[in-house]
Image (cartoon, rainbow, N blue to C red):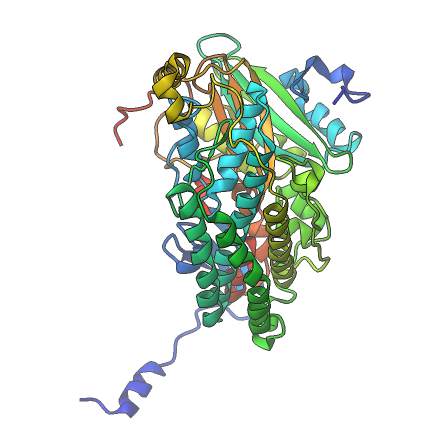
Amino acid sequence: MSSPEDSIAFAAEPVADTAPEGRSEPRRMTLNMGPQHPSTHGVLRLLLELDGETILSAKPDIGYLHTGIEKEFEVKFYQQAVTLTDRIDYLAPLSNNLCYCLAVEKLLQVEIPPMAQWMRVMLTELTRLNSHLVWLGTHAIDIGAMSVFLYCFREREEILRIFEMFSGQRMMTSYFRIGGLALAPPRGWRQRVKKFIDIFPSRIDEYESLLTGNPIWMGRTKGIGYMTVEDMLDLGITGPMLRAGGIAIDARKQEPYSSYEKFDFEIPTRTESDVFARYQVRVEEMRQSARIVKQALEGMPEGPYQADAPKVVLPEREKMKTQMEALIYHFKIVTEGFRVPEGEVYQVIESPRGELGYYIVSDGTAKPYRVHIHGPSFGNLQGLPKMVEGLLVSDVIASMGSMDFVLGDTDR
Amino acid sequence: MTLPEGLEPFILSSEEKLGELTVEIAPERLIEALRFIKSYLEFERLSTVTAVDRYPSEPRFEVVYHVHSIARNTRMRLKARLSGDNPEIDSATAVWRSANWYEREVFDLFGIRFLNHPDLRRILMPDEWEGHPLRKDYPITGVQV
């Protein structure tokens, strides 16, 4: 057995420096990060060109999660395709459900009853909380704050239970359907959501007490990953990142959909445009989302949960047993779908990650002719090379965390 | 929204439907038109670039640009029609850098070439993939992987 001195001597063997004296060119090294790196949250590959620890350039390589969802849309009936939308951004399934349904409803010119609209707002805001909680937990764990993750997932679990209560599914909810909601809200939903939302703001204080004044957290995030507003607009970055740069842009305010104009909330902004500012923006967004959920809970209108459009919305089971028309409509919708008038729409909503857009082209049949999904992660990720240029390798982790991308949303 | 002033010389036709404005542009004047839209009409953002395949009719491809103005809080859709054999159009990367990945995606999935693009490679499909999956004549199943 060798003594400890031997091993030290072995490790300390001098490495010949082959670089010529007085070199002007930096000694470059290419580092392959991912696609299985834990901090890439999915399968993202980054090719980093380094000079020592400093990043000279970064090249993201995406496509590992490409599943051809846009092609798949073209062979499904409009109502069947709702289930595909869940699987795009798996942290915000209801946001994708909502955007798709709104786009098709715009083509169909269907009026959605107020109760369904408010319920959609409430659940998409819970989705935002869900997504931001996963972001905060994993972002913190990437930078080394382990415990925040456990606290965040405690609350996220409760949100997933609420989703399960509504739709029967924790993640792939498909709860919003064209024309309203899939099911009537379950018994006891008010108490469940109220219990959660009453306690949640104090939980945000808990996370903040762990991070906001924490010197290590501030050291790792302040001044890191800075981007100018011009660069962000030019590179296609949206959402909390843009707001952390000082632009108060949010589709919920500027282009309100699904009754968002009836809710009272603020768009948090910062001007520092660094990782810490993005953290502050998202934390404040959680508080605002909690406010919206509370308002939705208190002001939830009474009424039907589906539109009065028998050719589009499946009839109630009870009616099918007594009414001939209901049975016929059910049969027709299930077997041949419903025809959507010819036309095209681009519907935009504010997903937890930024601007989410669905471009749907209809040729007048029961299946979409073309669906294009503009996932916010796709645009945001494009800004990564610019963001990490000149930073250190460890800052890449912090910068990527602050972008909050989901690779399913990027690759579709 | 109505057609913004000053855009008329660039467009072939315009249509407003469901509250959304669609403008058709001749492919050879695309860059001029995009520059004008960005600098004079305050459309700061390029929201998305995509395409629609009208196979088998001609012109086969529509390249679709969605632009967004934060200052005026409006959106607009621009279209350029391309023929099916050797579809090519100028790259919008000269106007917005974000067009880089958007156009790579269209190149990858539709096989439309963007001229003067700095890095025109496949982005979602593997580099050695044959064919362009979002074309209408590409089968939905039965492709050997």
Q: Quadrant of the N terminus of chain A?
A: bottom left
In the depicted view, which residue is nearer to us: B117 or B48? B48
User: Percent x, y for residue A8?
Assistant: 32, 87
**Would you identify the image quadrant in which residue A39 lies?**
bottom left
In the foreground, A257 or B10: A257
Q: Is residue A389 above or below residue A101?
A: below
Report the side of B133 relative to A237 (left or right): left
Q: Is residue A157 above or below residue A170?
A: below
Q: Residue furthest front?
A: A322
A263 or A244: nearer the viewer: A263
**Residue at screen point 71% across, 54% down:** A269
User: Quick check: can you spot residue A25?
Assistant: no
From this view, report whether residue A79 is shown above or below residue A65: above
The quadrant holding residue A10 is: bottom left
Q: How many marks?
A: 0
Residue B110: percent from left, percent from top: 46, 24
Residue visible at 71% across and 47% down in the picture? A264
| Quadrant in which residue A158 is drawn | bottom left
Q: Is residue B55 visible?
A: yes
Q: Is residue A188 left or right of residue A253?
A: left
Which residue extends farthest top? B57
Residue at 37% across / 18% down in the picture?
A: A322
* Residue B86 percent across, percent down from the top left: 48, 17
Residue B63 in the image, given as x and y percentages of width and height: 56, 22
